[in-house]
Image (cartoon, coloured by chain):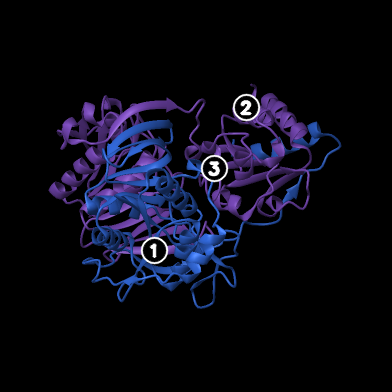
Amino acid sequence: MSIVTFIKSTPDTAAKVEVNAQGAVSWGTAQLVLNPWDEYSVTEAVLLKEAHKVKTTAISIGGEANNDALKQALAIGIDEAVRVWGDGMDGHDSLVYAAAAAGAVRKLGDVSLILFGKEFADVQTDAHVYQVARKLGWTALGAVSKIVAIDFAAKTITVARMTEEGKQTLTAKLPAVVAVLKDINEPKSPSFIGIRKASKATIPVWSPADVGLNVSTLAHVTAYANPPARGGAVQIIDGATDAERAAKLVEKLLAEKVI
Amino acid sequence: MPNVFVWVDQFGGRALPVSWEAIGVARNLADGGTVTALVFGSGVGNVVTLALHYGADRVIACDDATLADFRLEPYAALLSKLVAEHKPDIVIGGASTRGRELIAAAAADADSALLADVTDIKAEGGKLVATRPVYSGKVISTVEAALSRTVFVTVRSRAFAAPEPNSARTGEVLNVPPVLSEDQITTKVVGFEETKGAVNLTDASIIVTGGRAVGSAEGFAPVRELADVLGGAVGATRAAVDAGYIPYAHQVGQTGKVVSPNLYIAAGVSGSIQHQAGMRTSKIIVAINKDPDAPIFKIAQYGIVGDLFKVLPALSAAFREKLGK
């Protein structure tokens, strides 16, 4: 009985990210941090560990920069960390990620629950969450705002899921893959003892062969570009009274034909 | 001429608008090939008819009690079986909560390429070439996949125009049985609580958003009032959500929804880079803020420097008068 959470290092969301002259994505000297959505999945894993005495492992599929995220997870209270990476994985698509992640979970063995943050904030994808579940043949529960109940021995889970229309409550069998939303908890900060433990940790790296990776990338990123700038300067609406300014703005918006 | 499948996301017998946008994308990519709409659910006859009106050549429908609520297991099993049988060149779905899950799952089942959450797409030289925003919309990436095997695609809400429906259009409807029976499905829906007065933010053409400056739950009243007058949805910044003024479902930004309305009115919103990540592709942005130096004015077309508690009611009154409400 153990919990795995898959995490990633991403540029700080406040960083200025742009495409440089070489066509590569650059965030200058900004720091890499734990993917903001992973703060919730890591915290949820630690809360479940404390309540149910289960082992927790954080896994990153990616280059060395992800050691920062893994150490952050250890400092927050995750027991062990593993990184999966090797030749042929650069520029991988969600399918390769899913196959590698499923292989890592099989290699660990005895995993009851996989937690993901809603998406990776850098590449803005969540496809891997559902693809990992299909590769393992497990149930996937996405957009989860609360784990209402979980029983590792009886292999059952109840979650609240937030869809476009409202809140759905679902029960399912473990093992399962769960993707969590921001609403699920208040993210934990690293503890002093945790930071010391994390600083001493060495993080094993599993190769593609170790996780039995047998698929290759089919969806290729071929180029990056800066988005078109939002045109022109703001037009500040002046007037003697709020009513006058409101009336002027209404005229402008009606002329824009957006109402 | 590619044959294209479009999965139509529906809830309670009503299709999400992004489903029709997806049919429009399918029509363009099919370039004379067949567009087949896939309608799964219970009591979805009306959706089947509308799918034809919106441009599908035919529909494969599975109308069954096990599909009444979306659950990934039975939906993915059915979609994957249909893909294996019919071998379409392209499978498209809207990038809604359900669409993202289902299309990704089916792509994994088929060991096929997935172009997710795209905002533009074309067929070119035996490949599908798409663009999608990354890094919170600060960068646009081009992704491509060969059409030598089925390619799966999800399209972002409001990125593509929906076709005009034509009620004279008809087509073949193929009814198929589900793949999984209820006792084979381990996920059970045990409760549902509809969001009160929910206007789906990602589908909304007008959004009025309140930031930290609304100051309280009651402070959202003028924001709601203007949204009501305009028939729009209510958005919120992370600061307003974290302060407990409004539920998380309303949050726009990095850790909330990404929206792209025709009109986005930001009231008492400073305009952090994380908030901009969720709304910078809005067509027209209006900023209302006491602070003339607030970053939101840098991405807005129109601004009013003033107190939202005075400006919003004035706007509601002015719109009421003009719109005759």
Q: Colour of chain A?
A: blue
Q: Is residue B235 above or below residue B323?
A: below
| Label 2: element kind | helix
Quarter containing the C terminus of chain A = top right
Q: Are marks 1 and 2 on the same chain?
A: no
Residue B39: assigned label: none
Q: Residue at x 68, y 41 (%)?
A: B212
| Label 1: element kind | strand
| Horizontal and vertical percent position of residue A116 | 39, 51
- C-alpha separation, residue under disc 3 versus residue under disc 2: 16 Å
Give the residue number, with chain letter if any, for mark 1. A81
Residue B229: assigned label: 2
Residue B261: assigned label: 3
Could you tell me if residue A13 is visible in this image? yes
Within 10 angstroms of label 1, few (less than 14), some, or many (20 or more) residues? many
| Label 3: element kind | loop
Amino acid at circle 3? Pro
Parent chain of label 3:
B
Residue farthest along the top direction in this orientation: B325
Q: Residue at x 61, y 43 (%)?
A: B237
- Camera-nearest residue between B233 and B205: B233
Residue farthest along the left direction in this orientation: B85
Q: Is residue B318 left or right of residue B147?
A: right
Q: Quadrant of residue B13?
A: top left
Parent chain of label 1:
A
Amino acid at circle 2? Val
Supply the letter of whichever chain is purple. Answer: B
